[in-house]
Image (tube, rainbow, N blue to C red):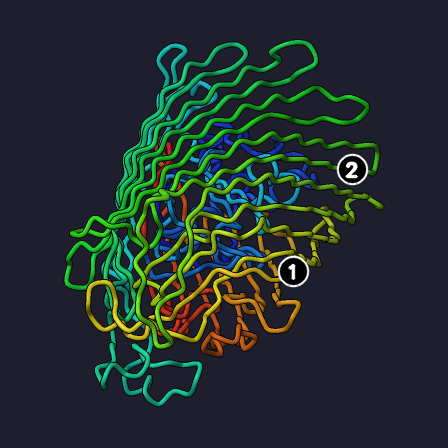
Amino acid sequence: MSHHHLSLGKKKLLFILISGLLSSVSTAQSTAPSLEITATGSQEATQSILTPTKILQGDELLNKLGTTLGATLANELGVSATGYGAGSSRPVIRGLEGSRVQILQNGLSVGDVSNISQDHAVGNNMQNAHQVEILRGAAALLYGSGSSGGLVNVVNDRILTNLPDRPTGAVNTSYETVNNGRAGSVEVDGAFGSVAVHVDTAINNANNYTIPGSSTQSQGEPVGGWTVPPGGNEGNNYTGKLPNTFSNQNNLGAGVSYIGQNGYTGVSVERLNNNYGIPTPEGGSINQSQNRYDLQHQTRDPFAGFSSFKFSAANSNYNHTEFNNAGEAASQWKNIANEARLELAHNPIAGWKGTFGAQFSAASLNATEVGTGSYAIVPPTKTNSNALFWIEEGQWNSLQGSLGLRYNNVAQKPNLGTELGVQDTTSGPTPGITLQNRNFNLMSYSAGGLWNFMQGYGTGVAYTVSQRAPSAQELYSYGAHESTATFDIGNPNLTKETSHNLEFNIQKTSGLMRGKASIYANRFNNYIYGFYTGSSIVTTPSGGEGDGFSVVTAQQAAATIKGIEGELTYNWRQHGLGGRIFGDASQGTFDAGGNLPLQPAPRLGAEIAHQHNGWLTNASYIYSYQQNRLANWEIGPAPSYNLLNAGISYTERVKDVNWTVYANLKNLLNEQIRYATTPMAVRLYAPQPGRSLMIGLRGTF
């Protein structure tokens, strides 16, 4: 199934593959069972505690697909986005982001530096995605510790696990008005004897996007409807196209696998390029590239008592160059990451089935200033992580239970000889830190239960304790960061962060009317956050005016996030008329008083769709409340907004190809949308795109 790029992020549209419609699309996808990568390897147990809390695939994924992972998931239940322009947007899950939301590709770390700063794009290309999974609780412990928000796994099926019985593939092309966006992709799967081959390529070029409103409207707006840029830029407000919101991506991927009677062995290679703008008052751009190599092996029924042995490994060589608004290279970032994991799944014992295994990773981060050769923001750091995990799920009639355990050792080793660049601030020189090696032992565990008290009705509870080691940037940062307009100072003495998450849920999973709702509380000991000290640097390292770059230090405090989310559906994902209403809200506070930064605003939404004889029409509406519960250093409030989207598509089979022509309207009301989860440097300056029409054609065979 193709990962055709539809730059359709921020859409909560209905779209699901319906039986009979696009039937060969689903056939094409099912030839490569991508769910091998999921926690359970099966999509049948929709009520399972260990399956991903959300699996985006098929038509639903195609029609929500954005240029970034954050844009693709921005309107899922409990998920927001950092929204850092068109080129960089990362998921925010239940008010948590950065290192607390781990991004995987085919079950292994994506190997980028997107968790260091919101202006760093995630190192995967969404046009190739067959499936996106959101995992929490025990399922998340399979892949990482410290992901207190959750994990997002992007599956691209480059390494085929079944032999295609005939060549299959897809083509897609689209055009979008708001940014003159042109996208195209091709994918082909085939087999030669026992060898399966996959090739894919995609290109997506988008100019600066149009923003709603005009300079005169902007100047007259109250707080919450800021000028662009804030303060009016001496009267030179931008209208029309917002500078530095362009995005140009291309990639090439290939995979080869040998498929035998009881398993497969495969390798894949990928080259990814991404050049995008940074929409801050200072401006600038990032040119990103990554080479990635993957190896996967699985043996089914390897020996008595065990159903599967899996080994996977990846090497990624990531680099990006940051340019200032004059087009001059300012800094270069490199991250070389190697990761390997093995999993052994056992047959059921007394109702329990499970997986245990080990995971090893090593990363080397090196960021340097162009010209001087000195470090940029974070000293060179090597990070090593070794983990053991064990996950079990049991079922007894109407009861299900899950248990998860993960031990992780993380070592952070900075270059101790790095000379840190002390700066003058409005209150004296920046406070010094002493670089030191750190070693953390982490123990995370989860327990959950689900009771199906009536046919199709269930209620559950889950308790997860997740420990996270401080990241390299939280420990060792010491430098000015233009994209966030801050001077970041780490704390080498930080202790591990522990979250205690308790969640209750109820669900109805059969009948025309279905629904689910969750309520949760996530309590943190030693929550790590960036504290705005109130002082700002006098000059930037380049010698220019610092423009009041705020001094931000890494600190820890007790904090709690509480939230609720739910949805109610009628005849959803079936022929005829379907509808859905949904909502989510979460709020994080420091136990000593005050709000956590970058917390999402509460949202309510509704969707309606109709499917008949190859036609699919839909509309979705989201109301996001004003977010005025901000950290005391955040400027606000983040304004409320109305997001209205609509779409129509028609599919017809011509010879052996299913052709779909589609049109999608986004932000029909042309509202100025600013996410509360977007860092201030961008939120106050750059709204999301205005009204847009996308038209496209895709074919699958």
Examine the rendered structure and indicate whether residue 602 appears above or below residue 657: below
> Which one is in front, 445 or 364?
364
Residue 575 seen from this side? no
Q: CA distance from mark 1 to mark 2?
A: 22 Å
Residue 564 seen from this side? yes
**What residue do we see at 78% from left, 43% from top?**
450
Where in the figure is residue 391, as x and y percent of width and height? 67, 32
Quarter-wise, where is residue 111 in the image?
top left
- SS type, badge 1: strand
Q: Which residue is mark 2?
A: 400
> Which one is in front, 126 or 272?
272
Q: Which residue is mark 1?
A: 565
The crowding category of the residue bearing disc 2, from other C-alpha atoms within 10 Å (few below 14, some 14 to 19, many at least 20), is many
Amino acid type of the residue that numbered disc 2 sits on in the rendered structure: Gln
The answer to whether 87 appears left or right of 21 in the picture is: left
Where in the figure is residue 458, as x and y percent of width and height? 78, 47
Where in the figure is residue 248, as x and y percent of width and height? 24, 51
Examine the rendered structure and indicate whether residue 458 appears above or below residue 292: below
> Which one is in front, 311 or 578?
311
- SS type, badge 2: strand
**What residue do we see at 69% from left, 27% from top?**
354
Instruction: Locate the N terminus by quadrant.
Output: top left
Quarter-wise, where is residue 139 in the image?
top right
Q: Mark 1 vs mark 2: which is more N-terminal?
A: 2
Where in the figure is residue 131, as x and y percent of width and height? 48, 40
